Image (cartoon, grey):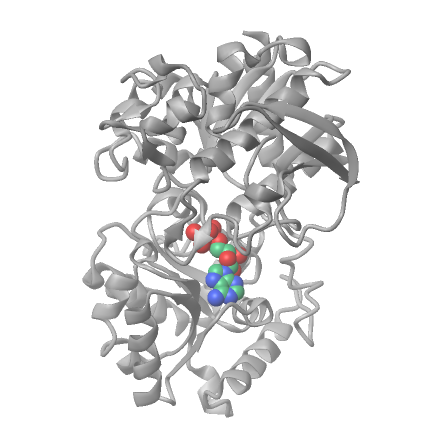
Amino acid sequence: MVASEAAPFAKTGGLADVVSALPRALARFGHAVDVVIPRYRGITTGERLGHVTVPDVDGPIDVSIDAVEHDGVRTLFVDHPGYYDRPHLYGVGNDDYADNAARFACLARAAIAWGAAAPEPYAVVHAHDWQAGLVPVLLRRGGGVGALRDAAAIFTIHNLAYQGLFDASWLGRLGLDADLVHMSALEYWGRISFLKGGIVFSRFVTTVSPQYAREIQTREFGFGFDGILRSRAHDLVGILNGIDYDHWNPARDPYLSVPYDASRLDGKDAAKRQLLELVGLPAGDDDRCRPLVGLISRMVDQKGFDLLAELADELPRLEASCVLLGTGERRYEDLWRDVAARYPDRIAVRIGFDEALAHRIEAGADLFLMPSRFEPCGLNQMYSLRYGTVPVVRATGGLADTVRDVDAATGEGTGFTFAEASAAALLAALRRALARYRDPAAWRRIQLAGMRQDFSWDASARQYAALYERAYNK
Ligand code: ADP
């Protein structure tokens, strides 16, 4: 596997969790997996294995390959300090590093060069997101030799919004074939896209939920790539991410003072009281009867913060309290700080990244809100289900695949969903959930149905393994 992030070595988002958990699950089934990522600043582990020479902007360069092994998975670090020994992974703030095309071309080339020279053949090369998009391209353009001779390329899109777009002149500067600037290759509206390279040159393309795999073939969700993805519809597969139940399990969560599970839910009441006290909301007996809505998110439009903003005066007037944790766009941070100051008895807001508080919200809230405009997979709704915290979500992408809307007549379901990306639809779903909350027996059924769901990595890894078999045997 080739990627720009893998936990615990380098992480800015969900990609790092996948590139860490998936190889471990595959290893448990007996597969041998090497993961290749850059040696960024701060990665101090790893023994030197050797070197490879790869083409670069000013001629060939020598890069080192280091390795560390954990849980049956070997992680290889591509060491080239000029490219990777920097304060951040991709750039400073919203400004990408100007040489990202060269930095990630180097990653792909080093992975391919090292792989080809390996003593044992590889069956599959699995590249993730645009940063590894050149891997399938190189494999087909001369890299498929030695131990990579029979290797099939799989490419996974974790978020289509990031496309690795660069000036077409990079192709020549990087010494890549000039004919790749073509509609059927890397060209994208006069520029080149590493993401497109991954999509076009791989045997199979996957994305992180079945519903998102369908959505990205439409104009609304395709970010301009819907046509390219439709042309690969037969080889495009959605495989839901798993979640890490070692880390997100209310029965063994070190951040909770009273553990709980489906058979003893009183720990959840303790968690609610603790959370209310922690964030400074009223926590008396009457106050604890009021439903508590949790939200943990990047504060950006993708996550529905524009819809939420329209409800800034509505939310505090509901028969509920809310606790929001997140960072993101300044205007949303300011808005919610201001709302919390105006309604201190109903709304608590924490701006920042806080793992401990995230666990305490998942456990202590009664409902979890995720009104995303688009959501490739989403993790928090799956954590919420396991914690008996009923999700209220927009039915898009992985949210639609994981949350079953409660049927008004039968009461069957695991959460509350809404279809239209509007504040009114969000509010209607939330009101539906709050009405249901007043019936404790009905609510308990919804909680327990959610807690019984299984989103472990084993199921996802089996689907990837089956896809690898198909790719390899073609
Ligand atoms: P995305 O990767 O698009 O941001 P996901 O739902 O797939 O959304 O994953 C987000 C992950 O980051 C979750 O594990 C969530 O709990 C965590 N997270 C997001 N914001 C914060 C925050 N402010 N503090 C702690 N954890 C956060």
From the viewer's perspective, is residue 166 above or below residue 20?
Answer: above
x and y percentages locating residue 202 in the rendered image: 46, 19
In the drawing, does residue 224 fall left or right of residue 20? left
Q: In which quarter of the image is the N terminus?
A: top right
x and y percentages locating residue 270 in the rendered image: 61, 79
Give whichever of 226, 135 is nearer the camera: 135
Give whichever of 414, 315 is nearer the camera: 315
Report if residue 199 is visible in the image.
no
x and y percentages locating residue 21 in the rendered image: 64, 42
x and y percentages locating residue 35 in the rendered image: 66, 34
Q: Which residue is drawn at 54% across and 7% down?
A: 474
From the viewer's perspective, is residue 398 above or below residue 297?
Answer: above
The quadrant in which residue 106 appears is top right
Q: Residue at x 25, y 66 (%)?
A: 427
Q: How many labels does the image show?
A: 0
In the drawing, does residue 48 fall left or right of residue 147? right
Report if residue 468 is visible in the image.
yes
Give whichever of 368, 152 is nearer the camera: 152
